[in-house]
Image (cartoon, grey):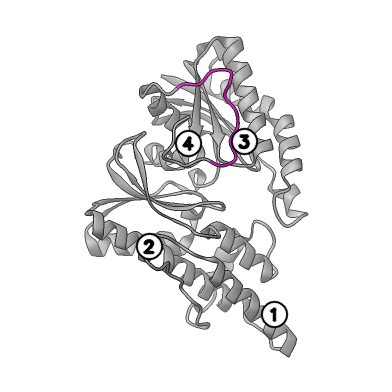
């Protein structure tokens, strides 16, 4: 089954054609990073306008690279939640128009489910059940994946997501947007033991995360140093901060794996590209005899190939939508459309 998939939840306009949930026939991404860098972050109104401009050409390119006409695909999939509502609406309405015009089934996909599904492309032999750490700019979840569409949340962030915490701290350190990527690069040359930073826990919820206090600690440290005229080593601070965030992520993920008896551990989301997180998880899995699955870097960020992968399994479960489908800025990963 060949699915044309669309993704427009934030600042990437993407289209892809995916066969049977595992094989990518084409994948096209139009990034807006250079424009949003001028403002230090994503401007929702600008993102929506750029999606309107890019959605047709990226879709045409995806079909062309796959060697297919619109009428030859078996379904139209689209990210319908969660995300920036204006950005989502562009993709959802365009997908509805395509499905109606081509008389193809419309398959709505949850953005976080799609991030998990990136691993079905990267590792075609991966099958549920497994435990997944989904970490991105807006989300940090520990998820028990019982089936391709049967998902249970064990833990989540109570405030900032890990990616958001990276981006905001990087901005305070004077790094350009997207800060998390730059912080990861700079941290490779720093001393992770140079600064002692908090590693917050959530009382009574061992799998939940809280990053706002850690982020605030770094911002206060920089402000205090500036007021005193003290020079701060940015590589050392970046390395110490990155280690603190990764320590929190891996600590809770390992606790969840031990408690559930999981043997297969999966990383997903934009922050799964973080160099230290990937290294640390590889080490922990070797020590504990766990299997580790991670998407290649090209599949960590937002893309439509992962949407097409998850759409195949949603279709197999009979999850379709009609022309009443609407974009939803928030939605539990456990819920269906």
Mark 4 or mark 2: which comes first in sequence? 2
The mark nearer the N terminus, 3 or 2, is 3
Q: Quadrant of residue 235?
A: bottom right
Mark 3 or mark 4: which is in front?
Answer: 3
* Labelled disc at residue 306: 4
Is 322 part of what is drawn in magenta?
yes
Left or right relative to 219: residue 126: left
Please state the horizontal and vertical placement of residue 326, each as a whole percent of the image: 60, 28
In the rendered view, would you say 174 is above or below 270?
A: below
Residue tagged 1: 223
Q: Which residue is mark 2?
A: 205
Per the model, the C-alpha gap separating discs 4 and 2 is 30 Å
Q: In x, y percent, where is residue 106?
A: 51, 20
Quick one: SS at disc 2?
Answer: loop
Q: Quadrant of residue 187?
A: bottom right
Q: Is residue 251 found left or right of 236 in the rendered image?
A: left
Choose the circle earlier in sequence order: 4 or 1: 1
Q: Main secondary structure of the magenta part?
A: loop
What are the residue bounds of the magenta stretch?
320-330
């Amino acid at each position: 089954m060949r699915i044309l998939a669309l993704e427009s939840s934030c600042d990437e306009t993407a289209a892809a054609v995916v066969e049977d949930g595992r094989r990518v026939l084409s994948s096209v991404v139009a990034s807006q990073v250079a424009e949003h860098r001028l403002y230090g972050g994503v401007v929702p109104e600008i993102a929506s306008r750029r999606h309107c401009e890019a959605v047709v050409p990226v879709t045409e390119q995806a079909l062309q690279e796959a060697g297919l006409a619109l009428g030859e695909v078996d379904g139209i999939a689209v990210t319908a939640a969660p995300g920036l509502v204006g950005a989502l609406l562009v993709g959802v309405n365009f997908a509805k128009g395509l499905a109606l015009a081509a008389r193809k089934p419309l398959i709505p996909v949850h953005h976080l489910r799609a991030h998990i599904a990136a691993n079905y492309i990267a590792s075609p032999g991966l099958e549920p059940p497994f435990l997944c750490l989904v970490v991105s700019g807006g989300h940090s979840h520990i998820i028990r994946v019982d089936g391709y569409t049967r998902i249970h949340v064990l833990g989540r962030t109570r405030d900032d997501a890990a990616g958001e915490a990276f981006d905001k701290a990087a901005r305070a350190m004077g790094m350009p947007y997207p800060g998390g990527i730059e912080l990861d690069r700079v941290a490779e040359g720093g001393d992770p033991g140079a600064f002692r930073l908090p590693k917050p826990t959530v009382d009574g919820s061992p799998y939940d995360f809280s990053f706002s206090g850690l982020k605030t600690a770094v911002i206060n440290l920089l402000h205090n140093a500036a007021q005193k005229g003290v020079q701060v080593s940015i590589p050392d601070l970046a390395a110490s901060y990155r280690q603190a965030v990764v320590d929190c992520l891996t600590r809770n993920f390992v606790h969840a794996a031990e408690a559930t008896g999981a043997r297969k551990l999966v990383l997903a989301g934009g922050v799964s590209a973080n160099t230290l997180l990937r290294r640390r998880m590889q080490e922990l899995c070797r020590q504990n005899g766990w299997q580790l699955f991670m998407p290649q870097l090209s599949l960590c960020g937002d893309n439509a190939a992962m949407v097409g992968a998850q759409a195949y399994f949603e279709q197999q479960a009979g999850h379709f939508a009609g022309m009443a489908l609407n974009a939803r800025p928030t939605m539990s990963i456990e819920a269906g459309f």
